[in-house]
Image (spheres, rainbow, N blue to C red):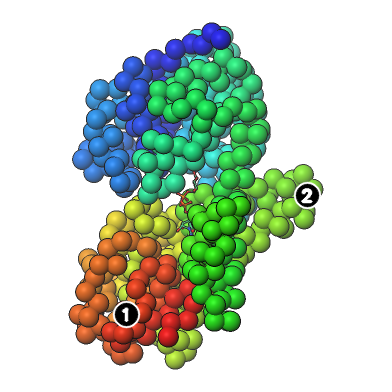
Amino acid sequence: MGTLPVMNICCIGAGYVGGPTMAMIAYKCPDIQVTVVDLNQKRIDAWNSDHLPVYEPGLDDVVRAARGRNLHFSTEVNAAIQAADMIFIAVNTPTKTFGTGAGRAANVEFVEKCARQIAEVSTGHKIVVEKSTLPVRTAEAVKRILENANNGTTFEVLSNPEFLAEGTAVQDLLSPDRVLIGGESQTAIQTLVDVYAHWVPRERILTTNLWSSELSKLTANAFLAQRVSSINAISALCEATGADVDEVAKAIGTDSRIGPKFLKSSVGFGGSCFQKDILNLVYLCEHFGLREVAEYWEQVIKMNDYQKRRFCERMVRTMFNTVSNKQIAIWGFAFKKDTNDTRESAAIYVCRDLLQERARLKIYDPQVSEEQVHRDLIEVFSHTHGTITDQERALIKEHVRVAASAEEAAQGAHAIAVLTEWDEFKRLNYDSILQSMYRPAFIFDGRNLLDHRHLSSLGFDVHAIGKKIS
Ligand code: UDX
Ligand code: ADP
């Protein structure tokens, strides 16, 4: 099959998806020039510095090996589009906050803007690849916009959803379970297959039609989120009955039909994808009149909201029905370990609920900045009532402090809440932490991360998800 060798790739969007993915393509394909562009100058400067804007284990080495050789970060969007044979769109597609479909549908405004910009400045033949997670049939819209380019440019549109998980992005990119490429033109598909075939075994590169590819991404995330909500639902039952959710997860996970992964009960899933993609799926089902299907998937999110709310309620109940003016150490603010990403992190919602109970929070996360914590809390209060009141602003200002270490956060606290499963929390000197806290010293382990028996024996009052600590 005749394919066009790709010499020059441009990626629009230097975020958590665009940055690492393009770094890996450049690293593995020295014969291809890769330019990642973004409107955000600060982000591009960071990609060109020693402090990358995305924290991912192993990413520094990959970027360092390719940057300046065949990996470039720039704000010159038009120039990069013009020079490219293949253009990836990896811009953000947040849930709409306004108009029709608000709170459910994806906001594809940024994707459309990219498509228009590509149409306007391109010449010759281009392959445009959707990398952002999009509602099914967005490729159609992108195609129509591109077809209306009047300068004789021809386009092929492909869907190539990204399945990397944050925190393990480099490993996932190095050795993906599969790469999925959807499209209509076999030549365009093969051209992208050839890029990935530089390091991914051919049998792991799946090709489908456009719509299957788009829908597979939403479905994969919906299934994964569903597993977490399923085990979290069981965790509530475990707490009521005396069963242990980790034991149940192990027992069912050894059934090869179920499998052991994604059965870790937690304070709730977060991240930029799960909730957004399920909402997207729900919106799509409603659009096609599939009410029962929409309700089925919506339940996954409701269960997740319940799990987050339940965690705070349990803390308050356990601490003698009041946390007002009590200091609580919040350990971890990122939505999972090994990332600095806080989007939809369960910690944001737990902190909001605790603040509404007038608790004083001392937050520590090894990768999340103080500014980010404040931004997220202001935003979550704004969303809760449509606007943030002066009182809430004052509450955040007076009741939230960011600590430089887990120990500092716990000093003088009534309780510790573990909200992200950072490894460093397992290696602390809990004896001295206990000495620095009020008694009873509560630990609420929202990740079932710590050695509960040991902590109990030291004198902590330990509470975990889906189990009773004797
Ligand atoms: C997810 C998908 O895994 C990935 O394929 C897709 O490309 C993007 O969305 P990501 O959100 O980065 O990746 O992380 P993931 O590891 O899936 O975790 C999502 C959330 O679920 C996290 O908050 C995590 O802590 C939580 N989780 C995951 C659990 O609570 N229990 C589990 O067993 C697994
Ligand atoms: P993701 O997790 O999907 O990668 P991010 O929000 O981390 O999402 O990254 C998306 C990036 O896309 C942001 O850095 C944003 O500035 C960039 N972006 C959005 N629209 C455009 C555009 N029209 N041109 C260039 N960059 C854009």
Indicate which disc residue 347 carries. none
- Report x, y in % for residue 468: 47, 81
Ligand 1 within 8 Å of disc 1? The answer is: no
Q: Which residue is mark 2?
A: 290
x 34%, y 53%: residue: 338
Question: Could you say which is closer to the camera, residue 286 or residue 385?
Answer: 286
Label 1 residue SS = helix
When the figure is inspected, residue 436 is found, relative to residue 230, above or below; the finding is below
Total numbered circles? 2
x 37%, y 49%: residue: 167
Rate crowding at label 2 as few (under 14), some (14 to 19) or many (20 or more) other CA atoms within 10 Å: few
Question: Could you say which is closer to the camera, residue 344 or residue 396?
Answer: 344
- Report x, y in % for residue 448: 42, 69
Tell me, yes or no, if residue 42 can be seen here: no
Image position of 85 (left or right of 337): right
Three-letter amino acid code at the position of disc 1? Leu
Q: Which residue is mark 1?
A: 455
Question: Could you say which is closer to the camera, residue 390 or residue 181?
Answer: 181
Three-letter amino acid code at the position of disc 2? Leu
Ligand 1 within 8 Å of disc 2? The answer is: no
- Report x, y in % for residue 349: 47, 67
Res 230 → quadrant: bottom right
